[in-house]
Image (cartoon, helix red, strand yellow):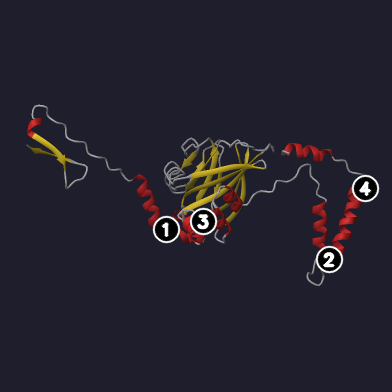
Amino acid sequence: MNREEYRAQVDAVAFSPDFQERTMARLMAQAQEKERKTMKKFNLRTGLVAAAVAAALSVTTYAAVVMLRPQDVAMQAGQTALADAFESGDAVAINETRTVDGYDVTLMGLVSGEGLSRVESLENGVPQDKTYAVLAYTRTDGTAIEDDVPELTVSPLVEGYAPWQLNAWTLGGGTHSFAQDGVLYYLFECDNVEPFADHTVYLAVYPGTHVPPNAETFDFDEDTGAITEKAGADVAMFTLPMDKAKADPQRAQAIMDGLFKPQPVESAAPAEDPENVENFVIMDDPDHPGEHLMIEN
């Protein structure tokens, strides 16, 4: 049964006029009886009884979706070791929601670097020098997400670095997603962002499928390093809770140097002179691998 059919059946249920009054009385009596039986173990307050009754009488037109936890999402993705990491005390629960392109996007949780290394089962499981984030998507109009994947891009951004320089592409990003009970769960990974913890680190979500951050979506102030969404752009920017003590400026610089280090180009063999080719032999230069020498024959 899908969500819409369930909602229709709940709406069709007819209640008698005194249903709420009788239910209230019954629940109150049961709660008070339970309170008397457990008084020796627990000092229950009347407020707890009233809260339980109020919760029981909260009849809605459809059942609330019980969201998976980050560790459940990791388990569904086949990442048992990562699920253990999200169970650890080093994982960070966030549960913040932003709206973008017709979707409510919730950043559920985050685990990085040291939080991964403390989980023994990760030794043969998940790479430890990574950052993992779990997000959940629901449609703002309440329509269930089935097998379709929202056309949204997720990318980390770091203040002080242009979005088109440091992002999901240059940090080796990867994703795994699946739909369950009308919710799309999204497991995102990239290289560990903790070395940049002395900067403001964002996880940006914006329209488009695998679209690298660009100047049409983001503004970058070269003087201050501030990153903001372009006027009129539809962007959700989550600020990641980073421990500044884990910042490593030298490693951060090494990461950036590695991204933009000039790549060696293999030297081409010198052009042969057709008139003199019989007088020379081309051979590899033993002192300069990749280069060549012309030796007179």
In the rendered picture of this protein, how many numbered marks are placed on residues? 4
Q: Whole-percent x and y of residue 188?
A: 52, 46
Indicate the amino acid at tag 3. Met
For the residues labelled 2 and 1, the Cα–Cα distance comes to 55 Å
Q: Earlier in the sequence, mark 2 or mark 1?
A: 2
Q: Secondary structure at mark 4?
A: loop
Residue type marked 2 = Glu
Q: Which of the two discs, 4 and 3, sits closer to the camera?
A: 4
How far apart are the two marked residues, 4 and 3, measured between alpha carbons? 54 Å
Which circle's residue, 1 or 3, is located before the other in the chain?
3
Q: Locate the N terminus and report the quarter of the image it occupies.
A: top right
- Per the model, the C-alpha gap separating discs 2 and 4 is 26 Å
Q: Residues within 10 Å of mark 1 (few under 14, many from 20)?
A: some
Residue 79 visible somewhere in the drawing: yes
Task: Check whether the beta carbons of the residues at disc 1 and disc 4 lie within 8 A of each other.
Answer: no
Q: Which residue is mark 3?
A: 242
Front of the two marks 1 and 4: 4
Which of disc 3 and disc 4 is earlier in sequence?
4
Residue density around tag 4, few if under 14, some if 14–19, many if 20 or more, within 10 Å: few
Q: CA distance from mark 1 to mark 3?
A: 12 Å
The residue that label 1 is drawn on is: 248
**Earlier-in-chain disc, 1 versus 4:** 4
**Residue toward you, 83 or 205:** 83
- Residue 236 appears left or right of 19: left
Please name the residue that numbered disc 2 is placed on. Answer: 35
